[in-house]
């Protein structure tokens, strides 16, 4: 193994995981544009499925557009909308 070989996923995997977690916890839509690389869409789908998030991918010649949509928001506190 040379100095350029890593024993961990590329740095983009950490960003992908962060985007999925943000979508899962907020229920918001999170967009990512990443360089086109083999396995990126499969990795995005695996992380999204494990986190309960929907993912759509658009593969372009040099990039991949990923759209993560949280299925339900996780609200850390109760909110009362009652006006009475």
Image (tube, rainbow, N blue to C red):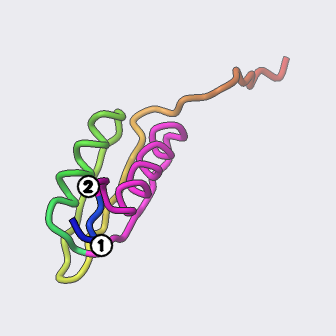
Residue at image position (82%, 23%) is 83
Quadrant housing residue 62: bottom left
Depth check, front residue: 32 or 69: 32
Instruction: Determine the CA span between mark 2 and mark 1.
Output: 32 Å
Q: Residue at x 27, y 37 (%)?
A: 49
Find disc 2 in the rendering and name its residue: 56
**Image coords of residue 59 (percent x, y):** 19, 70
Please, what secondary structure does the residue beneath circle 2 have? Answer: strand
Label 1 crowd bin: few (<14), some (14–19), many (20+), radius 10 Å: few
Q: Is residue 78 left or right of residue 59?
A: right
Residue at position x 45%, y 56% from top? 30
Closer to the camera in the image, 36 or 10: 10
Which of pointers 2 and 1 lies earlier in the amino acid sequence? 1
| Residue at the disc numbered 1 | 4
Q: Residue 34 at x, y = what percent?
A: 33, 71
Give the farthest residue toward the right: 84
User: Mark 2 touching mark 1, by CB under 8 A?
Assistant: no
Q: Residue at x 30, y 43 (%)?
A: 47
**Of 3 and 79, the residue lying toward us:** 3
Position in image of residue 52 (x %, y %): 34, 33
Up-down relation of residue 34 to residue 83 (above or below): below
Left or right relative to 36: residue 27: right
User: Which is nearer the eye, 66 or 29?
Assistant: 66
Magenta span: 7-35
């Amino acid at each position: 193994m040379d100095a350029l070989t890593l024993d961990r996923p590329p740095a983009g995997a950490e960003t992908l995981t962060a985007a999925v977690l943000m979508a899962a916890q907020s229920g918001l839509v999170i967009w990512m544009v990443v360089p086109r690389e083999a396995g990126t869409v499969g990795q995005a789908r695996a992380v999204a499925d494990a986190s309960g998030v929907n993912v759509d991918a658009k593969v372009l010649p040099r990039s991949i557009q990923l759209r993560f949509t949280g299925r339900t928001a996780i609200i850390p506190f109760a909110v009362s909308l009652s006006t009475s």
